[in-house]
Image (cartoon, rainbow, N blue to C red):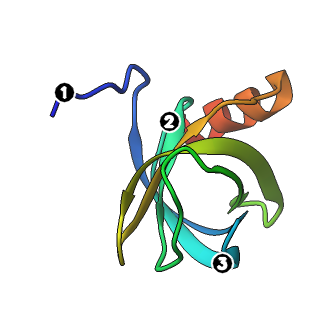
Amino acid sequence: MKNRRSDERVSTNLSARWEGLSGRHEARIEDLSLGGCFVNTAGRVDVGELVGVELKLPSGEWLKLRGEVASYQQGIGFGVLFTFLTDEEEQTLRDIIG
């Protein structure tokens, strides 16, 4: 499988929650870039589904992002492509990624 990621990815371990067609779920973010993230969760999604993902920042605040499910691994989680980043959201992600 060809790696389609063009943005640098960093390993992370952030508390998260997400909401999609199957409802609201708790999760962890293990992998983060300006282009997207991997959401570790048992919740079910469909590839192409639009989801809202909230990351708990080290400050304790929540960063709300939106994206499209790019991949799904049952029982493990899913990859999200951030499709609607504002300038402020992008800057916050840059700060997290370092």
How far across and down, in percent of the image, does residue 64 sit? 80, 51
How dense is the environment of label 2, judged by Cα within 10 Å: few (below 14), some, or many (20 and up)? many
Secondary structure beneath label 2: loop
Marker disc for residue 46: none
| 76 vs 49: above or below | below
Secondary structure beneath label 3: strand
Give, as a three-letter code, the residue at label 2. Answer: Ser
Residue at left 82%, top 22%?
87
Give, as a three-letter code, the residue at label 1. Answer: Lys
Residue indicated by mark 1:
2
Tag in front: 2 or 1:
1
* CB under 8 Å between discs 2 and 1: no
Give, as a three-letter code, the residue at label 3. Answer: His
How far across and down, in percent of the image, does residue 45 sit? 53, 64
Quick one: label 2 or label 3, which is nearer the N terminus? 3
How dense is the environment of label 3, judged by Cα within 10 Å: few (below 14), some, or many (20 and up)? some
What is the distance, in whole Å, between disc 1 and disc 3 at their CAs?
30 Å
Q: Is residue 68 left or right of residue 73?
A: right
Marker disc for residue 25: 3
Residue indicated by mark 2:
33
Residue at the left extreme of this rendering: 1
Residue at left 66%, top 74%?
22
What is the distance, in whole Å, between disc 2 and disc 3 at their CAs?
21 Å
| 28 vs 88: above or below | below
Q: Is residue 76 left or right of residue 86?
A: left
Residue at left 40%, top 27%?
8
Quick one: label 1 or label 3, which is nearer the N terminus? 1
| Quarter location, residue 26 | bottom right
Q: Is residue 92 left or right of residue 5?
A: right
